Image (tube, rainbow, N blue to C red):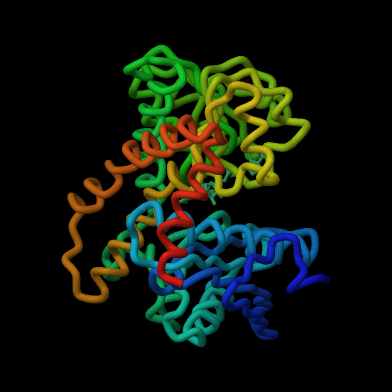
């Protein structure tokens, strides 16, 4: 396996591999950049097909967090962790505790939270072994599940995106296709339904599809048909790398905007979307609500006042960030993905 020559290696400051024979933990923690502060980012547990796929994911995800914090005005760096294994079959409280020990070894250079395959309960288990954890239960000095806040940020971010591309002031009457109905996707569907949006949805988990069909009147699609449905907006809320040479050609939407981290398989897919006249709301900008929430929890643990109002005020800045990116992309004739990267780099590279 390549490391320093790995396609996704981007001068990451630190990458650690952890194992625990007693609990079966196999984990990687990647810290991309700490120019702005200690690295903050979630922990993904996934049944990766091999170690290479896990390394690929953690390198990309941790880099995205550096860019996300920079554009969300958060004085933190970018980091992320992955645990190799099927969360449904292999995750145990003891494994989570040993992940906490791994995080503790990094002495505060990396602060963990939840991501795909991990949840508030897991962060609570981690907190038995480390102080450097966020997204724990509210009755354990935490801020709880960040996912509803992430979904709300995506919902708010859709408004300027729709205004920019479709010249409409409201989401009412629009159609949105949502891929992935987990922690974030479910709440996004809820907010969109309340706004009078028609939903097309898919998930590989039938129970999650049934819930959204029943509660929000969504139309269920087989997961492989989600790229083909005609809608105003496609909201990816599952895993990354799903927008590629093949799937972009199939899209019949005007906008791509959702919670999934790294939906673009490669940087040129941002340009491919604009060439197809599809406005892309960069993932790490529109989905920064969860980071904002766990950052406020971290700051409170350092002595700042924790306030839901401050979190909401912070999340409400997402639309303005997107407007800035769209204007910058138009002005320079570049894709919105490239524009977001350029604006983020101006912030965190200035500190080098
Ligand atoms: P989750 O694990 O709760 O939900 C993901 C859902 O996607 C699951 O229901 C899963 O069955 C489904 N899924 C997986 N592969 C699929 C496929 N091929 N087609 C359709 N459905 C599929 O995760 P989550 O916390 O909701 O996160 C979703 C995405 O948003 C991830 O990319 C995550 O990194 C990103 N994100 C989450 C947060 C947060 O606050 N949770 C914050 C920022 C970004």
Relative horizontal placement of residue 289, taking residue 50 as reference (left or right)? left
Q: Which residue shows up at 33% across the image and 18% down it?
A: 170
Q: Nearer the viewer, residue 330 or 5?
A: 330
Kindly indicate the quadrant of the structure image that contains residue 327.
top left
Residue 337: horizontal and vertical position, in percent?
55, 41
Relative horizontal placement of residue 306, taking residue 40 as reference (left or right)? left
Q: Which residue shows up at 63% across the image and 80% down it?
A: 16
Residue 92: horizontal and vertical position, in percent?
58, 70
Q: Which residue shows up at 65% across the image and 23% down it?
A: 276
Q: Which residue shows up at 81% across the image and 71% down it?
A: 2
Quadrant placement of the N terminus: bottom right
Q: Residue furthest right?
A: 1
Relative horizontal placement of residue 312, taking residue 72 as reference (left or right)? left
Residue 157: horizontal and vertical position, in percent?
38, 35
Residue 340: horizontal and vertical position, in percent?
48, 45
Kindly indicate the quadrant of the structure image that contains residue 188.
top left
Q: In the image, is residue 66 above or below residue 201?
A: below
Q: Residue furthest top?
A: 173
Q: Residue furthest front?
A: 332
* Total number of numbered discs in the rendering: 0
Q: In the image, is residue 170 above or below residue 59?
A: above
């Amino acid at each position: 396996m390549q490391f320093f020559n790995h396609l996704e290696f981007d001068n990451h400051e630190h990458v650690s591999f952890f194992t625990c024979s007693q609990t079966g933990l196999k984990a990687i923690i990647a810290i991309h950049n700490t120019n702005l502060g200690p690295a903050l980012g979630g922990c993904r547990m996934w049944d990766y097909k091999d170690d290479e796929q896990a390394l690929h994911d953690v390198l990309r995800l941790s880099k995205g967090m550096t860019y996300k914090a920079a554009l969300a005005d958060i004085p933190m760096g970018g980091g992320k962790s992955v645990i190799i294994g099927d969360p449904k079959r292999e995750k145990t409280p003891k494994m989570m505790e040993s992940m906490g020990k791994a995080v503790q070894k990094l002495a505060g250079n990396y602060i963990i939270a939840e991501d795909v395959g991990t949840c508030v309960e897991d962060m609570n288990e981690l907190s038995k072994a480390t102080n450097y954890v966020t997204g724990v239960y509210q009755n354990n000095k935490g801020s709880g599940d960040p996912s509803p806040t992430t979904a709300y940020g995506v919902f708010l971010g859709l408004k300027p995106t729709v205004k920019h591309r479709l010249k409409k002031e409201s989401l009412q009457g629009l159609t949105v296709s949502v891929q992935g109905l987990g922690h974030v996707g479910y709440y996004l569907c809820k907010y969109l339904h309340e706004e009078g949006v028609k939903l097309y949805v898919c998930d590989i988990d039938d129970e999650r599809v049934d819930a959204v069909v029943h509660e929000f009147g969504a139309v269920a699609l087989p997961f492989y048909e989600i790229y083909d449905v005609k809608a105003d907006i496609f909201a990816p809320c599952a895993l990354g790398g799903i927008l590629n040479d093949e799937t972009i050609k199939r899209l019949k939407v005007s906008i791509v905007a959702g919670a999934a981290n790294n939906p673009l398989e490669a940087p040129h897919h941002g340009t491919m979307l604009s060439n197809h006249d599809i406005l892309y709301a960069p993932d790490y900008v529109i989905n920064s609500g969860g980071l904002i929430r766990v950052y406020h929890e971290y700051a409170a643990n350092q002595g700042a006042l924790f306030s839901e109002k401050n979190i909401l005020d912070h999340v409400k800045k997402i639309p303005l960030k997107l407007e800035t990116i769209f204007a910058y992309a138009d002005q320079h004739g570049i894709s919105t993905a490239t524009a977001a990267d350029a604006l983020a780099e101006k912030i965190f590279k200035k500190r080098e």
